[in-house]
Image (cartoon, rainbow, N blue to C red):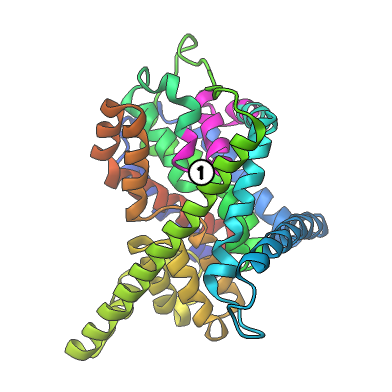
Amino acid sequence: MRYLISFCGLLFVFALALLVSKNKKEIKYKNILLMLVIQFLLAALLLNTTIGYVLIKAITNVFDHLLSYANAGISFVFGGLTNEGESPFFLTVLLPIVFISALIGILQHFKILPFFMTWVGFLLSKINGMGKLESYNAVASAMVGQSEVFITVKKQLDKLSPQRMYTLCASAMSTVSMSVVGAYMTMIEPKYVVTAIVLNLFGGFIIVSIINPYKVEENEDILTIEDEQKQAFFQMLGEYIMDGFKVAIIVGAMLIGFVALMDGINSLFDIVIGVSFQEILGYIFAPIAFLMGVPWADAITAGGIMATKLVTNEFVAMISLGEITDSLSERTLGIISVFLVSFANFSSIGIIAGAVKGLNERQGNIVARFGLKLLYGATLVSILTAIVVGLII
């Protein structure tokens, strides 16, 4: 029965994507089917095989070591501020972003990341039937972040059609950046973080291929990566460390505001109508959670977490999920966990539009105009990933 429900969920996602498709005649169904099969194979490999277990364990160990190194610096600066056994969210989850950001800067400086992103993107373009730029951008977004990625292709922004801009922005919103992966792994199971990142890469191509199909001419399919002005190593390192600290502070500020606001709204609704705002959202999103494979007994609770992520951000939703973990089945936790691993929320519209506008005002205005459609597509990517995982676990 659950397979039938999940199959209906797949049809539901594809129907919603087709509903807003700009040019159904250009849809490359063979490429979509191939990428869907790849999604299922990768999910089965990562979640149901010894090879997948070893691979995820190795990735987890790498991030565990990175977080331990980060904690050495954090303890040196903030040691003694907490009581024994306590682990404040800002110190243990957000501040390690500073160290991860520094590592990204080093990999960028020595051209390791650009080389990797370019060639992986080139190989992906052979599978997804899209341009090299679109494929590179999807990989780069997962490495350097949804706003920073546009800096690497800023020379080409002015030449891109609205269709290609939509694809680039949808890829950026559908994934997460490497700098926050370690933070996610402290909040939900690492195996679901890794699986979601991989599946979202292909899921983004699938949904965009339906919503926004187009053909890239050979003479337009040129990938020119922006080569930043060569900096002295320690100048670069200082900038990336400060960038990481800014991200940690910004995320922390957003969490303070969103968590407090959500708590206040929940209390207000509870007083006025006897039901919290999150519960109301849970009822609205429960059918979608059910089609994703969540048992109906957990659907309303899961729907509330999904809505929280959409309205606020993934960090707030992960905190909410952590508070009710014991009340949910393992299957529900897996499905909802992968759904949460993306930047698909309302605040990301402003982040991406602002990042593009800072580089090219005309394109930034175009991105702002299709902002809601961008969020719509990125949310479908998260739902698709959750359905695939629900069929596998």
Helix, strand or loop: magenta stretch = helix
**Amino acid identity at mark 1:** Gly
- Image position, residue 367 (x, y; %): 30, 36
6, 265: nearer the viewer: 265
Position of 105 with respect to 159 (left or right) is right
**Which residue position holds label 1?**
145
Q: Residues within 10 Å of mark 1 (few under 14, many from 20)?
A: many
Considering every residue shown, the one lying at the far left of the view is 272
- Secondary structure of the residue carrying tag 1 is loop
Quadrant assignment, res 83: bottom right
- Image position, residue 359 (x, y; %): 36, 29
Figure check: 258 above or below 115: below
Position of 248 with respect to 354 (left or right) is right
236, 292: nearer the viewer: 236
The reply to whether residue 172 is in sight is yes
280, 252: nearer the viewer: 252
The reply to whether residue 196 is in sight is no
